[in-house]
Amino acid sequence: MTIIKEEVEAPMRTLEHTRQGDAAQVLTLREERHRPSPGVGEVLVRMLVRPIHPGDLIGVEGLPGQPEQQWGPRTPGVEGMGVVESVGANVRAPLLGRRVAVFPAPGTWSDFVVVPADLAVPVPDGVSDETAALMLVNPLTVRMLYRAVEKALRGQTGPVLQTAAGSSIGRLVSAAAARHNLRLINLVRSTSGAEKVGTLYPSQPVIATCDDDWQQQVRRHAGERGVHVVLDCVGGAMTQHLAELLADGGTLISYGHLSSGTTPLEALPLIARELTVRGVSILHWMSRTPRERAEDVAFAQDLAQRRPDLLEVAAGYDLADFNAAVEHARRPAKSGTVLLTTLRAAGSGQGAGR
């Protein structure tokens, strides 16, 4: 008797949750045999690497003090890198089998995701899978932040104060400031963090907020008028202290919420000192003009090729090991971004290009 062995496809794995809460309690790994199919103008991407961004965790866990939300099964993640497995009708670009970075692509914490073909960005040769997975969200965020800073400065050169300067985005902001001769003052949480950031960007003052006199240190570096712009991803109780450091007519740009606590808007001297508070969110990047988006993507591709060190990886964990990955992503002293990975299938794609 002849036995014919048929190749059986591995099941598709997907992380999902139906309510907000601690990731270890609400996230589950589901497996199924059927993969999604791309529609008109879409591609199916076999995801290989995806980052855990702070915003991803906020989506899973919610913000402190906010009511818990519930919904049908939801898969986290908006960014990642993979290989185009199949294409739908009317996809003209030669994407089949190519490595691509995707954003915005809700549900990337899965082995497969369907995205519009024009949101599948080809990964440049020589860029590693890990770097490609971080190629879009943070660089595009920095482009949005830089536009907001330019608008707030109204032709002035600063100074600009940024919080969490040792974070992935903070390092990108510092690099952009050095390139454009922007006066930047960096805030970090610890003395060790201050030493690290100071070594990377010696021309930029760096201050640890664990120092009792950190606000006085900022004022000494900023000069008599104070800080023109604050770039803040910490939020919470820190907001009031940051507003006190702004010059009259200054702008606080908020783009994250890493801290606990809240600051009521009424507690800020918005009227008396003519301060402006504005938010910037990568989730609104698609509202930019097509020309701006094309320029931003070209910037991100170039950055991935020239400065992969600015897209630092903290560690990689298999998708099934998500609890350990989330625990690592929460560590305040980590350096770089934690990745969720999937083993590359034999013969898939064009290679990592390391």
Image (cartoon, grey):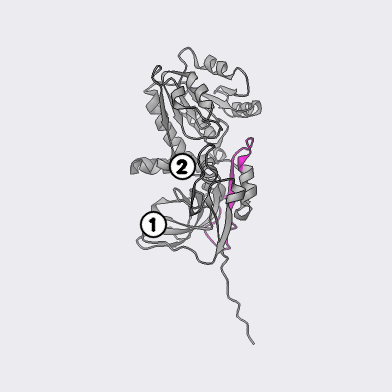
The residue that label 1 is drawn on is 93
Report whether 154 appears left or right of 335: left
The single residue placed furthest to the front in the displayed view is 67
Residue 300 bears which disc, if any?
Answer: 2
* Residue 329, position as x, y percentages in the image: 61, 42
Query: Which residue is more in the foreground, 33 or 314?
Result: 33
- Main SS type for the magenta part? loop
* 101 drawn magenta: no
Residue 39 lies, with reference to residue 261, above or below; the image says below
Residue range in magenta is 329-354
Q: Secondary structure at mark 1?
A: loop
* Residue 198, position as x, y percentages in the image: 60, 26
Residue 237 lies, with reference to residue 248, above or below; the image says below
Neighbor class of circle 2 (other Cα within 10 Å; few <14, some 14-19, many 20+) is: many
Report whether 43 appears left or right of 29: left
Identified by mark 1, the residue type is: Ala
